[in-house]
Image (cartoon, rainbow, N blue to C red):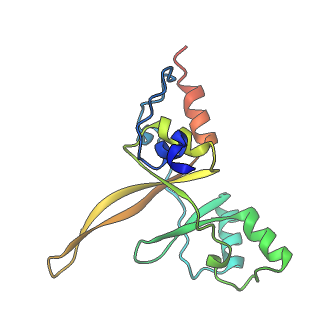
Amino acid sequence: SKFVNDKWMIKNGFLNDVQEHKPWWWNIKVQKLNLSAPLILLPEVSCQKAIEILQEKGYDQAPVVAESGLILGMVTLSNTLTSVLAGSAEFSDPVTKVTYDQFSKIGLEDSLGKLSCILENDHFAIVVHEQMQCSGNGSSFMKQMVFGVVTAMDLLTFVSRNDKK
């Protein structure tokens, strides 16, 4: 079960990794990846428009984030096209119909080792940063802001460019 799976425990922040022979990059923070700002789609964007935007901007995927800042998931170009062609979604449907709502989040201060554990099972992770937001009445709350999307290719590129051999 999950609670005896060390990789799941590390990925979900319940256990610090105790790997004995960590690679040189293991404890480097995610923020060192220098990710570019993500393209964000609002939930009301249509599948047709999402395809056009992703192709025009040269992205394969984009987080879907509500106006409130709630991260709803990730939309990919291939899943959107496949869903429309298979008839399970229409071009006019909102992009939320083809959004992956199962995704992993990682913080800027988390290690590349933790990211590596996440990417063993997931194709990507959404990089988030917590910010305190204050309203006019003096109340405050923590809000997660999408800082980027990271893939195994991003990690591999970082490691190969900075290899300490």
Quarter-of-image position of residue 129: bottom left
The x and y percentages for residue 17 are 45, 34
**116 above or below 78?**
above
In the image as oriented, which residue stretches furthest toward the right?
86
In percent of the image, x 60 and y 51: which residue is there?
124
Quarter-of-image position of residue 165: top right
In the image as oriented, which residue stretches furthest toward the bottom?
92
In percent of the image, x 47 and y 29: which residue is there?
26
The x and y percentages for residue 122 are 62, 50
The x and y percentages for residue 20 are 48, 21
Left or right for 111, reference 79: left
Nearer to us in this view, 103 or 32? 103
**114 above or below 83?**
above
**49 above or below 110?**
below
Left or right for 49, reference 71: right
The x and y percentages for residue 83 are 78, 73
Residue 99 showing in the rendered view: yes
Residue 35 showing in the rendered view: no
Nearer to us in this view, 76 or 113? 113
**6 above or below 84?**
above
Left or right for 124, reference 107: right
In percent of the image, x 42 and y 47: which residue is there?
13
Give the total of numbered labels.
Answer: 0
